[in-house]
Image (cartoon, rainbow, N blue to C red):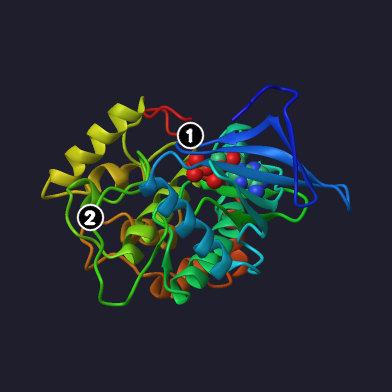
Amino acid sequence: MNWDPSAVVVKNGYKILLGRLIGEGTYAKVVEGIHIASMQRVAVKVCAKISEKREASIRREIEVMKRLNGHPNVVRLYDVIEEEKAFFIIMEFVEDNLLLMMDRQASGLSEMQAKKIFTQLVDVMSFLHTKQVVHLDVKLENILWDPRNQRICLCDFGMSQFFEEDKTLKGICGSFGYVAPEVLLNKSYNGITTDTYSMGVVLYTLVFKCFPFDDRTPADRICAQLQEANNPDAYGRASLDLSMRQLTPELQDLLHQLLTKDVSKRLTIRQVRKHPWLRKPSLLERLFSMRRPYVLNQRPSF
Ligand SMILES: Nc1ncnc2c1ncn2[C@@H]1O[C@H](COP(=O)(O)OP(=O)(O)O)[C@@H](O)[C@H]1O
Ligand SMILES: [Mg+2]
């Protein structure tokens, strides 16, 4: 692939600007594009067919996107262009993502602000799970943010899987800091509660602007998580309790039930929807939850 700043590919009525990088993940680059007829800006995920295994995984990613297309909190798929050596996945362009948005904040969000975002995440994850899809890589950088409409948009279905109710999964998935302990310990897992664990990490990072487990570097983060995963008393309720005392009891309870190591006690998405923190708050709760939590100075923020 020619990534020259001036390299342009014209296909299916789209101009793909290979030199205009929007984002980059482990396997793919996302660049800017233009829908020529409407002059609308689009995002193009360029996925190289580096092996048969990789090609199969890109095909699955596209199938997942097609199944989910149309939900307001799922990044919209416009077109797929298949070339001999690569796929171009043409999507709606969304300006920002939650990691960049959080980077610009001086500290974590208030509970009210976090709830506005998390409610949308619960809606979209609930939609995925009813469509028999587990995401398996929920994290701030995979949640796009449309500031004008205050809307989140889930993207990156590269690790997603179709699942059946009683089928378990095995193998590595997810990202440092967000991955559930059972995955780290190489056990088989059910993708639903693996997703809700990562949602718990997202929620924690929204209110505290740092990870629930020590995270100076990705390697430290994985060590801290592994240590926690292997610790029979984990998740060291003590360390989580200490940091969470500043939150409303409802949010503390929700975070505990999402970040618990015990899969049988971890909430499914259906249970998360019913959790008291997500119901409409009373005026008193609203006032209390407008306050931001104190900055946690014992942990580095990102
Ligand atoms: N539709 C989009 N609009 C704007 N930015 C996007 C879009 N899709 C992805 N990105 C950005 O590109 C980054 C990498 O894309 P992603 O699909 O996550 O690739 P990977 O599978 O390699 O992780 C994302 O973290 C996000 O910041
Ligand atoms: Mg990604």
Queried on whether the Cβ of the residue with tag 2 lies below 8 angstroms from ligand 2, the answer reads no
Residue 117, position in %: x, y?
59, 56
- Observer-side mark, 1 or 2, equals 2
Circle 2: residue type: Lys
Classify residue 62 as left or right of residue 132. right
Q: Secondary structure at mark 1?
A: loop
The foreground one among 253 and 61 is: 61
The dot on residue 261 is: 2
Residue 150, position in %: x, y?
71, 54
Q: Which residue is mark 1?
A: 295
Q: Residue at x 35, y 70 (%)?
A: 163
Residue 42, position in %: x, y?
74, 47
Q: Compared to 245, does 17 lie above or below?
A: above
Circle 1: residue type: Val
Q: Residue at x 25, y 40 (%)?
A: 225
Q: Compared to 157, does 5 lie above or below?
A: above
Q: Residue at x 63, y 27 (%)?
A: 2
Crowd band around label 1 with a 10 angstrom C-alpha radius: few (<14), some (14–19), many (20+) = some
Crowd band around label 2 with a 10 angstrom C-alpha radius: few (<14), some (14–19), many (20+) = many
Q: Quadrant of residue 70?
A: bottom right
